[in-house]
Image (tube, coloured by chain):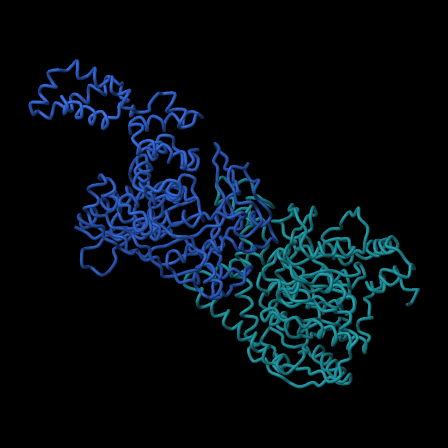
Amino acid sequence: MPAEKPLYALTGLELLGLIKQKKTGIADILESQSLRTKAVEEKVKAFARFTDNTASGIPIAVKDNICIQGQPTTCASKILENFIPPYDATVIQRLKKAGFIIQGQTNMDEFAFGSSCENSAFFPTRNPWNPDCVPGGSSGGSAAAVAADEAIWALGSDTGGSIRQPASFCGVVGLKPTYGRVSRYGLIAFASSLDQIGPLTKDVRDSAYLTNIISGYDPNDSTSLNLPVGDYLKSLEKDIKGIKIGVPKEYFSLSGDGELEGLDREVKEAVREAIAQLRKLGAEVSEVSLPHTEYAVAVYYIVATAEASSNLARFDGVQYGLRVRSADNLIAMYKKTRQAGFGPEAKRRIILGTYVLSHGYYEAYYVRALKVRALIARDFTEVFKEYDCIVTPTSPTTAFRLGEKLENPLAMYLSDVYTISANLAGVPAISVPCGSSKAGLPIGLQITAKAFDEEMLFRVAYNYEQATLWHKMKPNL
Amino acid sequence: MYETVIGLEVHVQLKTRTKAFCGCLNEFGSGANTRTCPVCLGFPGSLPVLNEMAFEHGMKVALALNCQIQNFTKFDRKNYFYPDLPKNYQISQYDLPLALDGGLKIKINPSATLRIDGERSRTIKDKEKTIPVKRVHLEEDAGKLIHEGQDSLVDYNRAGVPLLEIVTEPMINSPDEAYEYLSELKAILKYLEVSDCDMEKGSLRCDANISLRLPGEKKLGTKTELKNMNSFKAVREALHYEIKRQAGILESGQRIIQETLLWDEALSRTVAMRSKEEAMDYRYFPEPDLPGFVLSEEKIRAVKDNLPELPQALKQRFIRDYGLSDYDVEILAQEKQVADYFEACFKVYPRAKSISNWLIGPISYELNSRNLDIQSLGLKPPELTALISFVDQEKISNLSAKEVLTERLNSKNTIEEIIKEKDLLQIRDSGELSAIIDAVLGANQKSVQDYLSGKTGAMMFLVGQAMRQSKGKANPKIAQEMLKERLKNA
């Protein structure tokens, strides 16, 4: 353990080790963290707000869409600005029980709608590697906080890549668990059939550790599955000799289309090198096919917006959150409240979702999307009959510049092209750092496994991580 | 003359301990918004969990209505904005409901026979008809809006209460049939003990759609939908009104507008609520928070095997085992509690007809005038049978017995105490009667002579005199026997 490293720069398990050896205490960690935050938060703007903690414990940052009892939880939206949940999300209960305290709530795209953190009603978060670039999104605040050593670790949520893409942009580890592995109770829903809470961490070991704490059946979430949770730290001990890895050809043939860009050459190179590294470690790598990949983005933006339009209907000014008081009748109150409370991207998705569910369009859009979703899921099932995992880029590009895609929603949507399929299929996927661009921006490698085989993800990710140094790189803040 | 085509949509609140999708108590009478939690308030992040008892209640009803329980069922979201709906969508069932294709057998025109006396109804043969039940599905209730001056308040205690929706095919052909269907349905729901079925309290609600067509016409006419009917009688009245209204429009060569109408009880008329053009698009889609599920044959069978006896079966059994008439059984079986009470009485006093007469007559009268059900009347079956046996043994008169019953219900005295206190026991002792007979014979020589000369009608006069002398306590039969005996020897 390099003693000269400040406490805030250590991983969670390193710190827990030091505490166990009585080489440091919670108070020292909190102080170190506080100093670090004071020094860099102004540049990064990762947090929506910090918590005044009376309790002591291991600090963790939490995305601002996971309910914490007695703390404002706003989804970075004006419509929930004054909303204070009367209950803890199940993951928060589990963290508290395990001795954690909530350090603060991280910035995000409003209601998790976005891939850049620019759709926050508060302010955009900056990428710690380059303040002119976005941290990714929607869990951009969580990824940036961890990358900037403002947080030891953080929770995010992933509906179409919202943990993995910012993890990739910020050079940290981000896991989207299997749908049903982690309780969604208390996660303010974006798209209920796709949402999943997961950890953003400095390395794979921390990811495995946190996942163990937050996973498991929850009777309050009917979509959580009653399956035993593996010992994820233990799964790291195995090597990956003989493991069969598939590389889907469709993910590498993504070509630019007019103003829309394809797979970045630097990203492609880094992933190729990572694949070579996995071979060196004894994995058997072959090309596979996920033939319905090209429909994933289209299917996603029908299913996700349909569910979102319904999930966000409750924000109407009646019970909680914003109410515009100048209205003189019920309909006017709804309209004025929602007009003032939602940002442009939220409105865009509510309108799109309402449209695809409407009479006369439902069959053509929603029903058809569900059918294609089933085909996408089947693609994965087929591959996993023979392969242990799939390796791809996490994002086709490195972090883009603030404002670059803000006026072009479609270009923004396409930045999730590699991450969306895992949500549609319900399978787990992790992003680990695998390179750096010439501009000094991190590149992420995505590993996907079959449902409820997080052990395989951690095993492959950890073996790769131990053989490289990418996760040790720190931004210069 | 037109053929009437009616379809009914009934919503019943299910009697469960907790609400449909959360742990809040499903009960009335508590302060506003005290039976609420993040789930039934639709708070951000909260998730529904299905109440299995509500689902089982739904299965029971579906099976009792001979519906096909679907092997795979799921929930859907019905999206619309209204302040009493916390999430602005209702969890309901759309294309894969709990059950399909059942039917409920009703008697055509029994309401007419019931209104006539018992003798008459026995001579009328009831016809039977099966009203097809299209679907049965489970959903959640909404809260209640309370308007106070300029303000509107919401009470969410009712939000999330389990509701069962029972929809018929449009194959009901008269308001009387509709009334009969609702009565039969209510009886079944009460027998299953799944709902209070109290229309005034809103635990049973009924909407109707109705259209007219010429006899022989295959195509359905344009329908209107009727809402806001607060009793079965109101349903019948509203349908009668709507038949006249629609017939009037058709007769004048105009077309019916498809619209939703509200029944105004005070004005005895329907008023327009919204037209088809304003009809809502509910944007149904599968509820992603509740996975669909498979119901095994074993589960369905287990529920079916545990169904209690239903009204039809009970009626047949009462006719068979107790030798009661159709008419008696029809009335006894209306309320499960009354039927149960009958059987409890029969156990201690096996004279079915007497018990039945008492339940249909005096007891029913007392229940109505006191607005009570038989359980809250506070009269134990052995008490009633004791009273009946006094009458059957001719110890007291029928008239006195009714007086005793009323007195018993008003006071805490026992039947025996009341009879004694009021001195109602009939005089059966010949010694005691002898003096009265002597006095009557002595004072009515003319009638005695009449009788002895063959005018048998004089006997009734003499008996009447004996009754008068005894202040009504003389047993008329015994008195008559003694008079005859005395005059035979004269």
Apparent side of residue A171 relative to residue A90 in the rendered image (left or right): right
Location of residue B297 with respect to A242 vertically, above or below: above
* Of the pair B300 and B202, the residue shown nearer to us: B300
* Image-based side of B89 in relation to B213, left or right: right
- Please identify the residue farthest to the front as the structure is shown: B489
Q: Locate residue B99 relative to residue A242 in the image: left or right.
A: left
Identify the residue shown where x is 51% and y is 53%.
B53
> How far across and down, in percent of the image, does residue B106 sit?
29, 52
Q: Which one of the lettered chains is coloured cyan? A: A
User: Compared to A297, does A79 lie above or below?
Assistant: above
Q: Position of residue A302 (x, y in %)?
A: 52, 66
**Chain in blue (letter):** B
Residue at 45 percent of width and 26 percent of height: B412
The residue lying toward the viewer, choosing from B158 and B211, is B158
Q: Nearer the viewer, residue B294 or A192?
A: B294
x and y, in percent, of residue A75 in the image: 65, 54
Q: Quadrant of residue A259?
A: bottom right
Which residue sits furthest left?
B453
B234 up-or-down from B224: above or below? above
Screen quadrant of the C terminus of chain A: bottom right
Q: Residue at x 50, y 40 (%)?
A: B28
Q: Position of residue A354 (x, y in %)?
A: 49, 59
Count of picture labels = 0
| Quarter the N terminus of chain A occupies | bottom right
Residue A357 visible in rendering: yes
Q: Is residue B283 visible?
A: no
Residue placed farthest to the top in the image? Answer: B443
